[in-house]
Amino acid sequence: MSEQAQVTGVVTTRPLSDALGAEVRGVDLRNLSAEQNQKILDAWHENLVVLIRNQTLSEEDQVRFGKLFGGGALSSGHIPALERVEGLVYVTNVKQPDRPDGILPDGEMQFHSDQCYRDHPSKGTMLYAIEIPSEGGNTLFANTYKSYEALPEAVKQKIEGLRALNVYDYGVNPTRCGQPNADAPSHVHPVVRTHPVTRRKSLFVNRLMTARIEGMPKEESDALLDYLFAYQERPEFIYSHRWQVGDVLIWDNRCALHARTDFDSKQRRVMRRITLPAEAVE
Ligand code: OGA
Ligand code: MN
């Protein structure tokens, strides 16, 4: 951020990749004007992922910023006892006596959309980087508008109106290879989803949590899902984020998937997360 930008409050954006993402520069998230807030929201709807670097946020600052995205209460969807303040949890491999443990397993995670196993999934998620490993632990983002749009017309027609079961069962991964745990949280959602703000269609299935397409024999469902996952995970639709301490990054769960690359479990990784409010799926 240049001195000039700080002084005049000029907000600039730059693309993060051809696939998706924009960096917004010239803002201090502790102290945003209504106009700056609107610019961040517009950049988010247009680019699916927004990055703001070099921030210093307390837990309360981060919650306050999370609420600027609108909607109801912030809720991580995880064990309420792990929430420090409303909707705020840590994603970390570091145990600290004064802090609840992190919510996710360590290491690599496959592509997914947060809370897709709920009736009303979260519209987006924010991570704030506090400590990062020297290498690995990148977060990958896949643009599922683009993968939908790239499908052959015949496939678009075939999947229109189909619904898929999404299951939260990290013990069986990928879910389709085993019998998901009967009491694991799950929900059926449309395979092709319409974004409530942009009205664009995207491909709302993912390798980590989508178990099967409703009303389709297992073999056919597995083959169709594998085909769709391969489209979603084409390199040209993916941005890999290499974290810096002080990064704040917000992704849209309605039109982007995310994944994480492996990292050395002996290295510290501390991210602070806000889960944006839940929404009905169209
Ligand atoms: C999450 C998540 C990925 C990461 O917080 O939902 O998937 O890079 N995090 O920690
Ligand atoms: Mn996630």
Image (cartoon, rainbow, N blue to C red):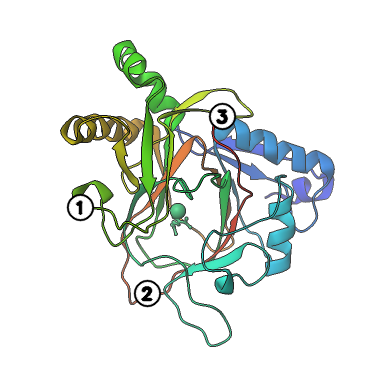
SS under mark 2: loop
On screen, residue 105 versus residue 255, left or right, reads left
Residue located beneath label 2 in the image? 267
Front residue of 43 and 4 = 43
Nearest to N terminus: mark 2 or mark 1: 1
Residue located beneath label 1 in the image? 178
Q: Residue at x 75, y 45 (%)?
A: 5
Residue density around tag 1, few if under 14, some if 14–19, many if 20 or more, within 10 Å: few
Front residue of 103 and 16 = 103
x and y percentages locating residue 61 in the rendered image? 73, 63
SS under mark 1: loop
Q: Indicate the amino acid at tag 1.
A: Gly
Q: Residue at x 51, y 84 (%)?
A: 96
On screen, residue 190 versus residue 180, left or right, reads right
Nearest to N terminus: mark 3 or mark 2: 3
x and y percentages locating residue 200 in the rendered image? 54, 23
Residue located beneath label 3 in the image? 195
Residue density around tag 3, few if under 14, some if 14–19, many if 20 or more, within 10 Å: some
Tell which quarter ligand 1 is in. bottom left
x and y percentages locating residue 262 in the rendered image? 31, 60
Q: Indicate the amino acid at tag 3.
A: His
Q: Is mark 2 within 8 Å of ligand 1?
A: no
Residue 268 lies in quadrant: bottom left
Residue 275 lies in quadrant: bottom right
x and y percentages locating residue 171 in the rendered image? 29, 62
The quarter of the image holding the C terminus is top right
Q: CA distance from mark 3 to mark 1?
A: 31 Å
Nearest to N terminus: mark 3 or mark 1: 1
Q: Indicate the amino acid at tag 2.
A: Gln
